[in-house]
Image (cartoon, grey):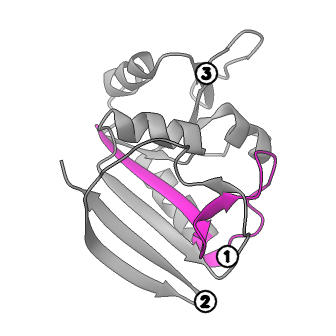
Amino acid sequence: MKIILMMAQTLDGKIAKNENHKADWTSSEDKKEFIKLTKKAGVIIMGNSTYKTIGFPLKNRLNCILTRNIKDKKDIKGKLEYFEDLDELLKSLESRGYKEAILCGGAQINSLFIKNNLISEIYITIEPKIFGSGINLFSDTDLDVDLELIESKKMNNSCILKYKVKK
């Protein structure tokens, strides 16, 4: 299964100011690209904190929430599903015929996927903002991942960089 990490970040590399920060700071161009690609894939994967900042399942795609504790979490079959185990999540998606999924954070989930060599491509929208402090693309972890630029595209005042993860 192809996993594409898709995130918006500030020029100084922050994906949010804190874990409760909504993604209302990103450009309309980024939002349109996100909607287009996530609907094409049909499934998005995120952590519980990221889901809480959105507050509802995104329409016309399966929202998979990877969290340490699914107790008291209610699935809405085919729309919103919770998983505690990464392997169980991936097997579930593959068994239903999904060929790709969009991973959309946060930092801990991004790190879990990159450490396990599960990310095929990374799409980063660089937004013209600086937060100074905040949440990085990956949580504090020792990484050494090589990337190959496959596309760069200017979108009004933002740009999107698309990378292939070299394995």
Q: Amino acid at mark 3?
A: Tyr
Q: Amino acid at mark 1?
A: Ser
Q: Is residue 36 left or right of residue 136?
A: left
Pick out the residue farthest to the front. Answer: 142
* Residue 103, image x, y percentages: 48, 45
* Residue 70, image x, y percentages: 67, 14
Does dot 2 land on a helix, a strand or a loop?
loop
Q: Which of the 4 image quadrants contains residue 148?
A: bottom left
Residue appearing at x 33%, y 21% in the figure: 95
The foreground one among 143 and 81 is 143
Residue 61 visible (yes or no): no
Contact check, label 2 and label 1, Cβ < 8 Å:
yes
Give the number of the disc on residue 157. 2
Q: Is residue 12 left or right of residue 103?
A: right
Membership of 106 in magenta stretch: no
17 w.r.t. 68: above or below: below
Q: Amino acid at mark 2?
A: Asn
* Residue 118, image x, y percentages: 32, 38
Q: Which of the 4 image quadrants contains residue 93?
A: top left
Front label number (2 vs 3): 2
Between the C-alphas of marks 1 and 3, the distance is 29 Å
Does dot 1 land on a helix, a strand or a loop?
loop
Q: Check disc 1: other Cα within 10 Å, few if <14, some if 14-19, many if 20+.
A: some
